Every structure is written in C-alpha cells, then in structure tokens.
Amino acid sequence: MVVCANCGSPTIVKTSWTPANPGRKFFCCITRCRGCGFVDWAEGPSCERAIEVFRHFGALAYQVKDHEEEALRMTSEIRQLQEQALGMAVKYTRLKMILMFSWVFFISYVAFH
C-alpha cells in the first residue's frame, strides 16, 4: 500500500485525464490535507497510440457532455412551451365560451325585441 509522503495517509488509485497523461493510473492522497493530492504513478507512461486514443475519447466525452447539457436545456424549453400551450388552450376555451354566450345573448335580444 502506498502512503502519502506529506501526511502519511493512505492513497487511492485514480485515473488521470490530463492531456499529458490521459488514462494513466496514479496514487492520490485520500485526505488532500496540506495540499496533498498526487502521490506517485501507479503504472508507467502510456504509449503514444494509447495517449492518442485516450485524447480522442476525452474529446468525445466533452462532446457528449455538451449534448447532454443541450438536451437538458431543450427539455426545459419544451416544458415551458407545453405550459404556454396549456395556458393558451385555456384562454382559447374561455374565448370560445364568451363568443358563444355573446351570440346567444345577441340572438335572444334580436328575437325578443
């Protein structure tokens, strides 16, 4: 087990997604006290092809995140439009009723006067 040199706490294995070391495993201090964080590499450097593949996947992951955010924004916009449509349907029904009653009143007025 690898311990942190700064504070002696145990470490966990994480994966780096930095452009310089994408996909490379490293030991990280679990407490992160006193500025602890990275402790040591858990494995040797990745080959150039692996780095290229990880960078490509990283770019794709950002695209997926962007699309997810756009989908959430669009979902919110759809909800707002649905609420507006419902409100307009209620107004339409009210106006139809007003028009109907006004015609009934007008016909009744004309017929009895």
Image (cartoon, rainbow, N blue to C red):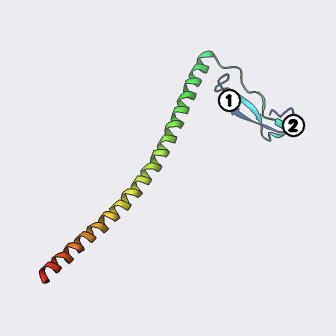
Whether label 2 touches label 1, CB < 8 Å:
no
* Percent x, y of residue 56: 55, 24
- Viewer-nearest residue: 102 or 26: 102
Look at the picture and state if 49 lies above or below 60. Answer: above
Label for residue 16?
1
Where in the figure is residue 27, as x and y percent of width and height? Answer: 75, 32
Q: Earlier in the sequence, mark 2 or mark 1?
A: 2
Residue 13, picture quadrant: top right
Q: CA distance from mark 2 to mark 1?
A: 22 Å
Which residue is depicted at the point 68% across and 29% down? 16
Image position of 112 (left or right of 34):
left
Q: Residue furthest top?
A: 48
Residue at which label 2 appears? 8
Rendered residue at 55%/28% (across/down)? 59
* Closer to the camera in the image, 32 or 96: 96
Work out which quarter of the rendered image holds the N terminus and state it: top right
Reply above or below: 102 against 80: below
